[in-house]
Amino acid sequence: MSTPRVFLIRHGETEWSLDGRHTGLTDIPLTSNGEKRVRATGKALVGPDRLIAPKKIAHIYVSPRKRAQRTFELLNLGLNRPLPWTPHGVPDGTGLQCEAEVEVTDYIREWDYGDYEGITTPEIRKIRAEQGIKGSWDIWKDGCPGGEAPHDVTRRVDQLIEEIREKYHKPAMDKGSDQCGDVLLVAHGHILRAFAMRWAGYALREGPTFLLEAGGVGTLRIEEPALLLGGAFVVELDGQD
């Protein structure tokens, strides 16, 4: 019997992710290249005999931000009900049929960067030095003034983990291989890395030892807290010969 999994899908490339700017509450779209890479991910990884099998998905959680929602729209999944948001682009087609409900949730909105929204890590460290704050800034320990601290993020991520395990994974394990139990999260870099750390039982202050690039996919299993990472797919980019 295959064990239920959680798929972590980071939204595709944006102008701010290209520049390394922290993008929390700011609602910006994917770049055209970001959309291309997400489409490639959907075609390569979604299918009845591929990593993400639509019929095995029990539930889908998506961030409130349009960059995450547009990413989901491009993943080659077709639903038997309307999306819980107004589509952010022209549909690519019907996609592969999926019976799961799509839920927009604040549980996986990006880390609230507060005063650090829209600026890069080097800029943050310069500001902190000018303020007389010693030591190199580490979001996993220091959080963001005017935004969220690590314990704030831990609280909401832990609530979602408990919900997934009790509502979707446990019933699937109890009923056997015929019961769909995979869960899909479409969200953002920091919050998905925080989710993976808490899934494995680590405190955020320990800091993750992995990255999840824009458009990348990670897989978590229920039996063992292992994370399998996959990068974004390489495609021919706009503006290149």
Image (cartoon, grey):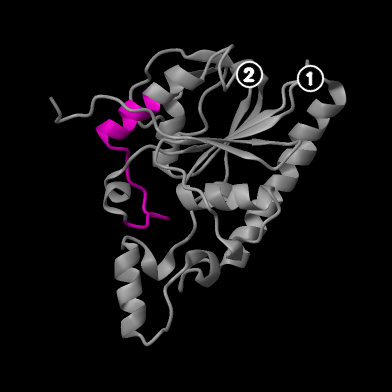
Q: Position of residue 52 (x, y in %)?
A: 57, 22
Is 88 on the left or on the right of 196, as rendered?
left
Q: Secondary structure at mark 1?
A: loop
Q: Quadrant of residue 47?
A: top right
Q: Find the magenta span and give its range.
A: 21-39
Residue occupying the point 78% across, 15% down: 178
Mark 2: amino acid: Glu
The residue to which callout 1 is attached is 1
Whether residue 35 appears in magenta in the rendering, the answer is yes
Is 124 on the left or on the right of 162, as rendered?
left
Q: Along the line of sight, which residue is nearer the eye, 194 or 70?
A: 194
Q: Nearer the viewer, mark 1 or mark 2?
A: 1
Give the answer, above or below, for where 176 lies relative to 105. Answer: above
- Quadrant containing the N terminus is top right
Give the answer, above or below, for where 203 lies relative to 98. Answer: below
Q: Secondary structure at mark 2?
A: loop
Mark 1 nearby-residue class (10 Å; few <14, some 14–19, many ≥20):
few
Q: Which mark is residue 146?
A: none
The residue to which callout 2 is attached is 99
Q: Are marks 1 and 2 in contact (CB under 8 Å)?
A: no
In the rendered structure, which disc, 1 or 2, sits on the residue that comes first in sequence? 1
Mark 1: amino acid: Met
Give the Cα distance between marks 1 and 2: 21 Å
Residue occupying the point 42% across, 83% down: 134
Residue occupying the point 49% across, 53% down: 190
Residue occupying the point 75% across, 33% down: 168
Q: Quadrant of residue 68?
A: top left
Q: Along the line of sight, which residue is nearer the eye, 126 or 90?
A: 126
